[in-house]
Amino acid sequence: MKNRLKVLRAERDWSQQDLAERLEVSRQSVNAIETGRYDPSLPLAFRIADLFGMAIEEIFQRGE
Amino acid sequence: MVGQAALRRPVWLWGIAFFVGMFGTGFVARWIDLPSIPSALVMIPPMLLLIPFVRATERAQAECGALSPATQRYNRRGLIWAFAYVLLLFVAVAGSRALHAQGPLLWGLAVLPALPILYLIWAMARYLVEEQDEYLRMRVVNAALSASGLLLAVATVWGFLETFELVPHVPSWAAVPVWAIGLGLGTFFNRWREAK
């Protein structure tokens, strides 16, 4: 799955640590999701979407 | 300042100091045929190295963004396990010799070292329940599956070799260290895959 997390984070000038704290997850989790090594669960994907005020499909797309 | 610098030594250095200290004193104690109680006493200082080892591990976990409250609790429980295991193993070995234990007393003493292992199994289960970070939990579950696979493979192969009297008998408590080695290898594999 592809995602726009890194771009969205950069637009807000947040570090991975900032995003991790806002999502209440570890920095490694953010890094793993951003680099596509880990696809988040649906509840975490909703938390990410809520944080950015977007729909899940605007952040995560099908594909490698 | 010197103390602070010593505390910031890397994990591997504390790990080596701990293992060399434990095995070294154990080997020397056997070599000079030290009785049970002095043997246990000389192993206390290297055993205490486990505390800075765990602290250094936690610092490293924090620096790479992987230290969660559940991990911290698991680390504390791991320390409790280690000290309880050494203490109860000593009580079981020294007690059975000193008391020439038989019958129910021997049963009680023999099961003593297993109790901290049961606590460790509980601590691992609690970690998986308490870990709120799904990615960290997934990594531990993957490592635990690797460990279980390794244990099943080793136990199966060794069992048949033993059946055909090609290798000596190994006590079943050896399952725990084999599983722990598997967990370590699984964790190492996780890190290697992340570093790629």
Image (spheres, coloured by chain):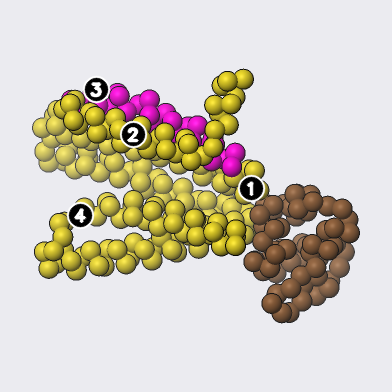
Mark 4 or mark 1, earlier in chain:
1
Mark 3 or mark 2, earlier in chain:
2
Q: CA distance from mark 3 to mark 2?
A: 14 Å
Give the image location of residue B23, x and y in percent. Answer: 31, 36
Is B172 covered by the magenta stretch?
no
The kind of secondary structure element at disc 3 is helix
Q: Indicate the colour of chain B.
A: yellow
Q: CA distance from mark 2 to mark 4?
A: 22 Å
Label number found at residue B196: none
Residue position marked by numbered label 1 in the rendering:
B64
Q: CA distance from mark 1 to mark 2?
A: 29 Å
Magenta residue span? B35-60
Residue type marked 4: Val
Residue position marked by numbered label 3 in the rendering:
B38
Label number found at residue B22: 2
Residue position marked by numbered label 4 in the rendering:
B170
User: Pointer 2 indicates a residue of which chain?
Assistant: B
Mark 2 and mark 4 residues within 8 Å of each other at the beta carbon:
no
Q: Residues within 10 Å of mark 2 (few under 14, many from 20)?
A: some
